[in-house]
Image (cartoon, grey):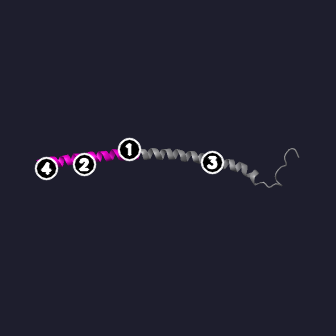
């Protein structure tokens, strides 16, 4: 009977260890999920900002690309 008791205690210890590992893994998975969600929000914000910057550059490009001859003289001339 002593052998069975030791075997049962060993099994209980192993189950407890597995439960602890499982809880740690669940915690890690949740942290990773939170990180991915934050990164997705950041990516969405950056994509919107990039689109706005592209649009601003598109609107400015004609005036940037004009030569001095094409440039209208200032109003005081």
Counting from the top left corner in percent of width and height, residue 42 is at 54, 45
Q: Relative to residue 42, is residue 1 drawn left or right?
A: left
Q: In the drawing, what numbered circle is on residue 3?
A: 4
Q: Quadrant of residue 16?
A: top left
Q: Earlier in the sequence, mark 1 or mark 2?
A: 2
For label 1, the SS is helix
- Position of residue 7 measured from the top left corner of the image (x, y, whole percent): 17, 49
**Is the residue marked by circle 1 packed among few (<14), some (14-19), or many (20+) residues within 10 Å?**
few
SS class, disc 2: helix
* Earlier-in-chain disc, 3 versus 2: 2
| Mark 2 lies on residue | 14
Residue occupied by mark 3:
51
Label 1 vs 4, first from the N-terminus: 4
Category of crowding for the residue at label 4, using alpha-carbon neighbours closer than 10 angstroms: few (below 14), some (14–19), many (at least 20): few
47 or 76, nearer to the observer: 76
Mark 3 vs mark 4, CA separation in Å:
71 Å
Q: Which residue in the structure is indicated by mark 1? A: 27
Query: Magenta residues?
Result: 1-29
Residue positioned 23% across, 46% down in the render: 13
Instruction: Between residue 56 and residue 75, name the one nearer to us.
Output: 75
């Amino acid at each position: 009977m002593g052998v069975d008791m030791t075997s049962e205690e060993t099994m209980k210890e192993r189950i407890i260890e597995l439960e602890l590992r499982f809880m740690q893994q669940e915690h890690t998975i949740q942290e990773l999920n939170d990180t991915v969600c934050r990164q997705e929000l950041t990516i969405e914000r950056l994509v919107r900002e990039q689109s706005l910057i592209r649009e601003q550059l598109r609107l400015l490009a004609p005036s940037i690309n004009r030569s001095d001859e094409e440039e209208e003289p200032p109003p005081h001339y």
